[in-house]
Amino acid sequence: MKEEMVYLEANMGEKQRIQWIDVAKGICMLCVIIGHSGISSIKTIVFSFHLTVFFILSGYTLKNDLSVESLAKRFRSLMVPYFATCMAVTAMDVANQMLLNKVTAVKAISEVVGMDLIRSFMASGSVKTFGTVDIGTRIGAVWFLPALFFAALIAQVMIKYVDRAEKRYMILFFPVLLNCYLAKFIWLPFSVQSAVLAAPLLLLGYDMKCNGTLSRISLKNAAICASIFAVGIITKKSPVYYVSTGMPDYAQSMVCAVASSLLIIYIAQKLQKVRVLAWIGRNSLYILCIHLFEME
Protein backbone atom coordinates (compact mmCIF):
# COMPACT_ATOMS: atom_id res chain seq x y z
CA MET A 1 0.00 0.00 0.00
CA LYS A 2 2.90 2.39 0.60
CA GLU A 3 3.88 2.30 -3.07
CA GLU A 4 0.26 2.90 -4.06
CA MET A 5 -0.14 5.91 -1.78
CA VAL A 6 2.95 7.48 -3.37
CA TYR A 7 1.25 7.08 -6.73
CA LEU A 8 -2.04 8.48 -5.50
CA GLU A 9 -0.69 11.49 -3.66
CA ALA A 10 2.05 12.58 -6.06
CA ASN A 11 1.72 14.43 -9.32
CA MET A 12 1.75 11.26 -11.36
CA GLY A 13 5.39 11.65 -12.40
CA GLU A 14 7.05 8.93 -14.48
CA LYS A 15 8.97 7.41 -11.54
CA GLN A 16 5.96 7.57 -9.25
CA ARG A 17 3.47 5.60 -11.34
CA ILE A 18 2.26 2.12 -10.47
CA GLN A 19 3.10 0.02 -13.51
CA TRP A 20 0.17 -2.37 -13.34
CA ILE A 21 -2.32 0.50 -13.50
CA ASP A 22 -0.76 1.68 -16.76
CA VAL A 23 -0.65 -1.89 -18.10
CA ALA A 24 -4.34 -2.40 -17.26
CA LYS A 25 -5.22 0.83 -19.07
CA GLY A 26 -3.05 -0.24 -22.01
CA ILE A 27 -4.85 -3.58 -22.31
CA CYS A 28 -8.24 -1.88 -22.18
CA MET A 29 -7.25 0.83 -24.67
CA LEU A 30 -6.36 -1.87 -27.17
CA CYS A 31 -9.69 -3.54 -26.42
CA VAL A 32 -11.51 -0.25 -27.08
CA ILE A 33 -9.99 -0.13 -30.55
CA ILE A 34 -10.66 -3.83 -31.19
CA GLY A 35 -14.23 -3.45 -29.93
CA HIS A 36 -14.91 -0.83 -32.58
CA SER A 37 -14.14 -3.37 -35.30
CA GLY A 38 -17.84 -4.19 -35.48
CA ILE A 39 -17.43 -7.95 -34.90
CA SER A 40 -20.29 -8.91 -32.56
CA SER A 41 -18.49 -11.82 -30.87
CA ILE A 42 -15.54 -9.57 -30.00
CA LYS A 43 -17.84 -6.82 -28.73
CA THR A 44 -19.56 -9.29 -26.38
CA ILE A 45 -16.20 -9.99 -24.77
CA VAL A 46 -14.44 -6.63 -24.63
CA PHE A 47 -17.52 -4.53 -23.87
CA SER A 48 -17.77 -6.48 -20.63
CA PHE A 49 -14.71 -4.86 -19.10
CA HIS A 50 -12.81 -2.37 -21.25
CA LEU A 51 -14.46 0.82 -19.95
CA THR A 52 -15.35 -0.66 -16.56
CA VAL A 53 -11.62 -1.06 -15.83
CA PHE A 54 -11.03 2.59 -16.75
CA PHE A 55 -13.82 3.73 -14.43
CA ILE A 56 -12.68 1.54 -11.51
CA LEU A 57 -9.06 2.68 -11.86
CA SER A 58 -10.16 6.31 -12.15
CA GLY A 59 -11.89 5.85 -8.80
CA TYR A 60 -8.80 4.09 -7.47
CA THR A 61 -6.70 7.19 -8.17
CA LEU A 62 -9.44 9.63 -7.10
CA LYS A 63 -8.69 12.07 -4.30
CA ASN A 64 -11.15 13.42 -1.76
CA ASP A 65 -10.60 16.92 -3.06
CA LEU A 66 -13.30 19.25 -4.42
CA SER A 67 -11.11 22.34 -4.48
CA VAL A 68 -11.11 24.68 -7.44
CA GLU A 69 -7.52 23.65 -8.20
CA SER A 70 -8.45 19.96 -8.30
CA LEU A 71 -11.47 20.55 -10.56
CA ALA A 72 -9.42 22.79 -12.85
CA LYS A 73 -6.73 20.11 -13.14
CA ARG A 74 -9.30 17.45 -14.03
CA PHE A 75 -10.92 19.82 -16.54
CA ARG A 76 -7.56 20.38 -18.21
CA SER A 77 -6.79 16.67 -18.35
CA LEU A 78 -10.17 15.55 -19.74
CA MET A 79 -12.27 18.38 -21.16
CA VAL A 80 -9.51 20.38 -22.84
CA PRO A 81 -8.41 17.34 -24.95
CA TYR A 82 -12.11 16.70 -25.67
CA PHE A 83 -12.73 20.20 -26.99
CA ALA A 84 -9.43 20.18 -28.90
CA THR A 85 -10.41 16.91 -30.61
CA CYS A 86 -13.86 18.29 -31.46
CA MET A 87 -12.26 21.38 -33.01
CA ALA A 88 -9.89 19.19 -35.04
CA VAL A 89 -12.81 17.09 -36.29
CA THR A 90 -14.71 20.24 -37.27
CA ALA A 91 -11.68 21.56 -39.14
CA MET A 92 -11.34 18.23 -40.95
CA ASP A 93 -15.03 18.22 -41.92
CA VAL A 94 -14.75 21.74 -43.33
CA ALA A 95 -11.61 20.77 -45.25
CA ASN A 96 -13.34 17.68 -46.64
CA GLN A 97 -16.27 19.77 -47.84
CA MET A 98 -14.06 22.36 -49.50
CA LEU A 99 -11.27 20.18 -50.88
CA LEU A 100 -12.90 16.81 -51.56
CA ASN A 101 -16.54 17.68 -52.17
CA LYS A 102 -15.73 21.06 -53.74
CA VAL A 103 -18.41 22.76 -51.65
CA THR A 104 -17.47 26.34 -50.81
CA ALA A 105 -20.84 28.01 -50.22
CA VAL A 106 -20.98 29.84 -46.90
CA LYS A 107 -24.37 28.31 -46.06
CA ALA A 108 -23.15 24.74 -46.65
CA ILE A 109 -19.98 25.27 -44.62
CA SER A 110 -21.98 26.90 -41.82
CA GLU A 111 -24.29 23.87 -41.71
CA VAL A 112 -21.28 21.57 -41.31
CA VAL A 113 -19.83 23.68 -38.52
CA GLY A 114 -23.22 23.98 -36.83
CA MET A 115 -23.75 20.22 -36.90
CA ASP A 116 -20.31 19.60 -35.43
CA LEU A 117 -20.97 22.14 -32.66
CA ILE A 118 -24.22 20.36 -31.78
CA ARG A 119 -22.67 16.90 -31.65
CA SER A 120 -19.72 18.28 -29.67
CA PHE A 121 -22.14 19.78 -27.14
CA MET A 122 -24.17 16.57 -26.82
CA ALA A 123 -20.98 14.46 -26.63
CA SER A 124 -22.86 11.31 -27.58
CA GLY A 125 -20.99 8.19 -28.59
CA SER A 126 -23.96 6.47 -30.23
CA VAL A 127 -27.25 8.28 -29.59
CA LYS A 128 -28.32 10.48 -32.49
CA THR A 129 -31.81 11.47 -31.36
CA PHE A 130 -32.13 14.09 -28.63
CA GLY A 131 -35.73 14.35 -27.56
CA THR A 132 -37.66 14.94 -30.79
CA VAL A 133 -34.60 16.13 -32.73
CA ASP A 134 -32.61 13.67 -34.84
CA ILE A 135 -29.30 15.18 -35.89
CA GLY A 136 -28.22 11.99 -37.66
CA THR A 137 -24.69 12.00 -36.23
CA ARG A 138 -22.72 11.70 -32.99
CA ILE A 139 -19.29 12.69 -31.71
CA GLY A 140 -17.93 9.13 -31.41
CA ALA A 141 -15.27 7.61 -29.18
CA VAL A 142 -14.30 10.72 -27.20
CA TRP A 143 -17.71 10.80 -25.45
CA PHE A 144 -15.77 8.96 -22.74
CA LEU A 145 -13.85 12.09 -21.71
CA PRO A 146 -16.78 14.30 -20.57
CA ALA A 147 -18.51 11.21 -19.15
CA LEU A 148 -15.45 10.48 -16.99
CA PHE A 149 -15.16 14.13 -15.98
CA PHE A 150 -18.73 14.28 -14.65
CA ALA A 151 -18.57 10.75 -13.17
CA ALA A 152 -15.52 11.81 -11.16
CA LEU A 153 -17.32 14.98 -10.06
CA ILE A 154 -20.33 12.97 -8.85
CA ALA A 155 -18.08 10.50 -7.04
CA GLN A 156 -16.07 13.27 -5.36
CA VAL A 157 -19.25 14.98 -4.14
CA MET A 158 -20.47 11.69 -2.67
CA ILE A 159 -17.14 10.98 -0.98
CA LYS A 160 -16.94 14.45 0.51
CA TYR A 161 -20.50 14.80 1.81
CA VAL A 162 -21.59 11.19 2.54
CA ASP A 163 -19.52 9.64 5.30
CA ARG A 164 -20.27 5.92 4.81
CA ALA A 165 -19.59 3.92 1.65
CA GLU A 166 -22.85 1.93 1.75
CA LYS A 167 -24.87 5.15 1.98
CA ARG A 168 -23.22 6.43 -1.19
CA TYR A 169 -24.31 3.39 -3.18
CA MET A 170 -27.83 3.54 -1.72
CA ILE A 171 -28.17 7.20 -2.64
CA LEU A 172 -27.06 6.54 -6.23
CA PHE A 173 -29.10 3.34 -6.72
CA PHE A 174 -32.42 4.86 -7.80
CA PRO A 175 -30.90 7.77 -9.76
CA VAL A 176 -28.90 5.21 -11.78
CA LEU A 177 -32.02 3.13 -12.54
CA LEU A 178 -34.04 6.23 -13.43
CA ASN A 179 -31.18 7.51 -15.55
CA CYS A 180 -30.99 4.26 -17.56
CA TYR A 181 -34.76 4.35 -18.12
CA LEU A 182 -34.87 7.98 -19.22
CA ALA A 183 -31.94 7.43 -21.60
CA LYS A 184 -34.36 5.50 -23.83
CA PHE A 185 -36.29 8.72 -24.45
CA ILE A 186 -33.90 11.64 -24.05
CA TRP A 187 -30.13 12.18 -24.05
CA LEU A 188 -28.59 14.99 -22.02
CA PRO A 189 -25.53 17.05 -23.04
CA PHE A 190 -21.94 15.93 -22.44
CA SER A 191 -22.96 12.29 -21.85
CA VAL A 192 -24.07 13.10 -18.31
CA GLN A 193 -26.23 9.96 -18.27
CA SER A 194 -23.20 7.79 -18.98
CA ALA A 195 -21.48 9.60 -16.12
CA VAL A 196 -24.29 8.77 -13.70
CA LEU A 197 -24.06 5.08 -14.64
CA ALA A 198 -20.28 5.10 -14.20
CA ALA A 199 -20.16 7.02 -10.91
CA PRO A 200 -20.77 3.96 -8.66
CA LEU A 201 -17.83 2.23 -10.35
CA LEU A 202 -15.56 5.14 -9.46
CA LEU A 203 -16.80 4.85 -5.89
CA LEU A 204 -16.06 1.13 -6.03
CA GLY A 205 -12.52 1.83 -7.20
CA TYR A 206 -12.07 4.40 -4.42
CA ASP A 207 -13.30 1.92 -1.80
CA MET A 208 -10.99 -0.77 -3.22
CA LYS A 209 -8.10 1.64 -2.77
CA CYS A 210 -9.08 2.32 0.84
CA ASN A 211 -9.41 -1.41 1.55
CA GLY A 212 -6.34 -2.47 -0.44
CA THR A 213 -8.48 -4.89 -2.46
CA LEU A 214 -6.81 -4.56 -5.85
CA SER A 215 -3.33 -5.05 -4.45
CA ARG A 216 -4.15 -8.50 -3.11
CA ILE A 217 -6.20 -10.26 -5.77
CA SER A 218 -5.36 -13.95 -5.40
CA LEU A 219 -5.26 -16.64 -8.07
CA LYS A 220 -8.35 -18.20 -6.50
CA ASN A 221 -10.29 -14.93 -6.71
CA ALA A 222 -9.11 -14.41 -10.28
CA ALA A 223 -10.40 -17.88 -11.17
CA ILE A 224 -13.79 -17.06 -9.64
CA CYS A 225 -13.90 -13.82 -11.65
CA ALA A 226 -12.98 -15.74 -14.81
CA SER A 227 -15.85 -18.18 -14.16
CA ILE A 228 -18.35 -15.33 -13.75
CA PHE A 229 -16.97 -13.73 -16.91
CA ALA A 230 -17.35 -17.00 -18.84
CA VAL A 231 -20.97 -17.40 -17.73
CA GLY A 232 -21.69 -13.84 -18.82
CA ILE A 233 -20.22 -14.44 -22.26
CA ILE A 234 -22.04 -17.78 -22.73
CA THR A 235 -25.38 -16.28 -21.72
CA LYS A 236 -24.61 -13.07 -23.67
CA LYS A 237 -25.46 -11.01 -20.60
CA SER A 238 -21.98 -9.60 -20.05
CA PRO A 239 -21.72 -6.41 -22.19
CA VAL A 240 -22.32 -3.03 -20.59
CA TYR A 241 -22.87 -0.20 -23.08
CA TYR A 242 -22.02 2.90 -21.09
CA VAL A 243 -22.21 4.88 -24.31
CA SER A 244 -26.01 4.50 -24.28
CA THR A 245 -26.52 3.27 -20.66
CA GLY A 246 -27.80 -0.04 -21.99
CA MET A 247 -27.06 -3.65 -21.02
CA PRO A 248 -28.79 -7.04 -21.46
CA ASP A 249 -29.45 -7.52 -17.73
CA TYR A 250 -28.78 -4.80 -15.16
CA ALA A 251 -27.77 -7.12 -12.31
CA GLN A 252 -25.90 -9.86 -14.18
CA SER A 253 -24.23 -7.48 -16.61
CA MET A 254 -22.81 -5.28 -13.86
CA VAL A 255 -21.65 -8.25 -11.77
CA CYS A 256 -19.93 -9.67 -14.85
CA ALA A 257 -18.42 -6.25 -15.65
CA VAL A 258 -16.85 -5.93 -12.21
CA ALA A 259 -15.67 -9.57 -12.14
CA SER A 260 -14.10 -9.38 -15.60
CA SER A 261 -12.46 -6.07 -14.68
CA LEU A 262 -10.86 -7.59 -11.59
CA LEU A 263 -9.61 -10.43 -13.81
CA ILE A 264 -8.03 -7.94 -16.22
CA ILE A 265 -6.43 -6.07 -13.32
CA TYR A 266 -5.02 -9.36 -12.00
CA ILE A 267 -3.58 -10.13 -15.45
CA ALA A 268 -2.15 -6.60 -15.66
CA GLN A 269 -0.38 -7.09 -12.33
CA LYS A 270 1.26 -10.21 -13.76
CA LEU A 271 2.23 -8.36 -16.96
CA GLN A 272 3.41 -5.15 -15.34
CA LYS A 273 6.88 -5.49 -16.85
CA VAL A 274 5.49 -5.35 -20.40
CA ARG A 275 6.61 -1.83 -21.25
CA VAL A 276 4.64 -1.42 -24.47
CA LEU A 277 1.36 -1.98 -22.63
CA ALA A 278 2.41 0.46 -19.92
CA TRP A 279 3.28 3.06 -22.58
CA ILE A 280 -0.12 2.63 -24.24
CA GLY A 281 -1.78 2.99 -20.85
CA ARG A 282 0.12 6.18 -20.02
CA ASN A 283 -0.92 7.68 -23.34
CA SER A 284 -4.40 6.18 -23.55
CA LEU A 285 -6.12 9.56 -23.57
CA TYR A 286 -4.19 10.75 -26.61
CA ILE A 287 -4.58 7.39 -28.33
CA LEU A 288 -8.35 7.63 -27.81
CA CYS A 289 -8.45 11.06 -29.46
CA ILE A 290 -6.35 9.82 -32.37
CA HIS A 291 -8.61 6.75 -32.62
CA LEU A 292 -11.63 9.03 -33.02
CA PHE A 293 -9.84 10.90 -35.79
CA GLU A 294 -9.00 7.59 -37.48
CA MET A 295 -12.65 6.48 -37.23
CA GLU A 296 -13.83 9.78 -38.69
Image: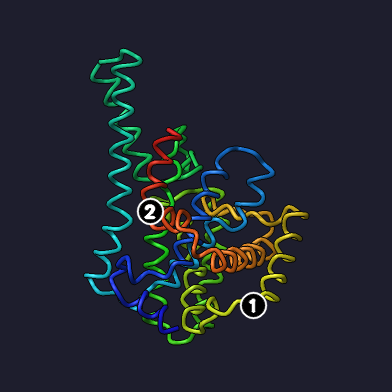
Q: Do the numbered discs 2 and 1 sit on residues whose CB atoms are within 8 Å?
A: no
User: Measured from the top left, where is residue 224 in percent x and y?
Assistant: 72, 71
For mark 1, give the secondary structure: loop
What residue sits 71% from the left and 56% below the top?
Answer: 237
Examine the image and state in which quarter residue 260 appears. bottom right
Q: Dividing the image into 4 quarters, which one contains the N terminus?
A: bottom left
Residue at image mark 2: 283
Residue drawn at x 51%, y 78% is: 208
* Callout 1 amino acid: Ser
Q: Compare residues 166 and 236 and report the one nearer the observer.
A: 236
Query: 32 left or right of 40?
Result: left
What is the CA distance from the residue labelled 2 to the residue labelled 1? 28 Å
Q: Amino acid at mark 2?
A: Asn
In the image, 296: left or right of 183? left
Q: How many discs mark residues in the rendered view?
A: 2
Q: Residue 131: which disc?
A: none
Q: Secondary structure at mark 2?
A: loop
Classify the position of the C terminus by image quarter: top left
**Does 2 sit left or right of 98 as displayed?**
right
Q: Is residue 3 left or right of residue 184?
A: left
Residue 9, horizontal then vertical, whole percent: 32, 77
Crowding at label 1, few (<14), some or many (≥20) Cα neighbours within 10 Å? few
The residue that label 1 is drawn on is: 218
The first of marks 2 and 1 along the sequence is: 1
Residue 79: x, y in percent? 31, 54
User: Which of the 4 image quarters holds residue 58?
Assistant: bottom left
239 lies above or below 210: above
For image coordinates 37% across by 74% down, the residue present is: 7
Where is 195 relative to 212, above or below? Answer: above
